[in-house]
Image (cartoon, rainbow, N blue to C red):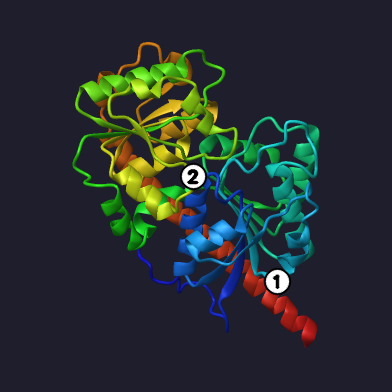
């Protein structure tokens, strides 16, 4: 992908400054990969970025980008709603952001936060963009009302990351003035956006030509024996000469780290868990690239793998993952069907179609990024013109 600045947009006397908002921070390394790719794409196209997130210090230290606390009604941290006026656009980036809290509430949960950010953007006449987001369905009556009221506004551009979310969004927002398009997950751009530190991190994880299985395991509580079956698959791989490493992309307390106590991982010859400390996105990319095959029960390790030409086998735990894996033409099994799965069956699958699709998805993700640039500049120029008229 070219790193040249976009020149087709109207020129202004200064660079646009965007607030990139999402559930980024120390705990979820997949979401951090989204933040990294989105921010790097914008910066390389002459847009300044500030990130609002859950762990500003971590994002600031690992990405070198100015970061501020995200909207949080529970802690009464709502300053970002007022500060929206400082920016030329608000971009809510990546993930299943249009996901309601388990009990519909206009102030709690990711979906509520997105709607409140859109409301603030509207009030301050700032363009609002939801970039590569997924949508749960069906929404509650309250959720549908909030979506049509705030996400359907004429200052809003909604770019859905999958076909089902796109169709749901069009149905829900029919007759509203927002722009609705479809792209793919921004993490597919990682292979073209990773910086020079990737090479140094590759040296940390050793040669890339050895037989290495990276097991990205999460808690599979609703499926008896599923984690134990993953251990059996790893033992079979070890018997075939593979080095087995365990790693988690989600390291919040009481989440995936619990999987270490749910089965006898020590029964795998030579197995070791990688440290659970958060690592930056370039190190994540290097770790996955150093593997010859990845088995993942979360989506983003699989996406980062195939985007770098590394074989990935998915263990789908929900419909969202099945949709992404099928669109990506990536071999996978649903977690409920692990009982007969073997490592030999996994290793014998054809992975090249997923590599080809990942390349295509990276191009689509870049097109989505350019739609974001167009929305930012369109609204920025309009707002600048309005301000000049008001001051004349």
Query: Residue visible at 65% across and 31% down?
Result: 137
Percent across and percent down for residue 234 are 32, 23
Q: Earlier in the sequence, mark 2 or mark 1?
A: 2
Instruction: State the mark number for residue 58.
Output: none
Tell me if residue 266 comes above or below residue 15 in the rendering: above
Query: Residue visible at 58% across and 38% down?
Result: 165
Tell me, yes or no, if residue 174 can be seen here.
no
Query: Residue visible at 49% across and 29% down?
Result: 218
Percent across and percent down for residue 283 are 38, 52
Tell me, yes or no, if residue 138 can be seen here.
yes
Percent across and percent down for residue 242 are 23, 30
Name the residue that disc number 2 marks. 30
Dot 1: few (<14), some (14–19), or many (≥20) neighbours within 10 Å?
A: few
Furthest residue toward bottom: 392
For the residues labelled 2 and 1, the Cα–Cα distance comes to: 28 Å
Mark 1 residue element: helix
Tell me if residue 297 comes above or below residue 387 in the rendering: above
The foreground one among 31 and 5 is 31
Tell me if residue 77 comes above or below residue 305 in the rendering: below
Q: Quadrant of residue 272?
A: top left
Name the residue that disc number 1 marks. 86
Percent across and percent down for residue 296 are 41, 32
Q: Quadrant of residue 10?
A: bottom right
Query: Residue visible at 47% across and 72% down?
Result: 8
* Count of picture labels: 2
Image quadrant occupied by the C terminus: bottom right
């Amino acid at each position: 992908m070219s790193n040249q600045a976009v020149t087709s947009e109207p020129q202004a006397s200064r660079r646009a400054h965007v607030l990139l908002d999402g559930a980024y921070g120390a705990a979820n390394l997949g979401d951090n990969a989204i933040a990294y790719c989105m921010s790097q794409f914008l910066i390389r196209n002459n847009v300044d970025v500030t990130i609002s997130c859950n762990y500003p210090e971590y994002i600031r230290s690992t990405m070198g980008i100015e970061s501020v606390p995200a909207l949080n009604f529970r802690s009464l941290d709502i300053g970002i709603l007022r500060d929206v006026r400082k920016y030329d656009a608000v971009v809510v980036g990546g993930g299943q952001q249009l996901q309601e809290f388990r009990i519909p509430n206009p102030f709690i949960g990711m979906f509520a936060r997105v709607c409140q950010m859109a409301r603030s953007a509207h009030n301050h006449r700032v363009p609002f963009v939801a970039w590569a987001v997924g949508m749960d369905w069906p929404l509650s009556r309250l959720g549908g009302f909030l979506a049509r009221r705030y996400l359907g506004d004429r200052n809003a551009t909604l770019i859905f990351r999958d076909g089902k979310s796109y169709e749901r969004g069009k149905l829900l927002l029919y007759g509203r003035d927002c722009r609705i398009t479809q792209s793919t997950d921004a993490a597919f751009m990682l292979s073209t956006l990773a910086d020079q530190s990737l090479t140094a991190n590759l040296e940390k994880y050793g040669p890339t030509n050895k037989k290495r299985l990276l097991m990205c395991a999460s808690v599979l509580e609703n499926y008896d024996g599923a984690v134990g079956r993953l251990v059996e698959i790893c033992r079979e791989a070890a018997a075939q000469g593979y080095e087995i490493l365990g790693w988690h992309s989600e390291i919040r307390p009481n989440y995936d780290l619990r999987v270490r106590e749910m089965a006898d991982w020590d029964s795998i010859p030579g197995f070791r868990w990688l440290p659970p400390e958060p690592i930056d996105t370039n190190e994540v990319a290097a770790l996955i690239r150093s593997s010859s095959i990845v088995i993942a029960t979360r989506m983003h390790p699989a996406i980062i793998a195939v985007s770098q030409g590394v074989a990935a086998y998915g263990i789908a735990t929900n419909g969202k993952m099945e949709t992404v894996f099928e669109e990506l033409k990536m071999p996978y099994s649903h977690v409920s069907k692990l009982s007969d799965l073997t490592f030999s069956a996994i290793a014998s699958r054809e992975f090249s179609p997923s590599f080809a699709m990942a390349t295509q998805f990276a191009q689509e993700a870049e097109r989505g990024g350019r739609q974001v640039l167009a929305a930012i500049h369109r609204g920025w120029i309009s707002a600048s013109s309005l301000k000049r008229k008001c001051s004349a």
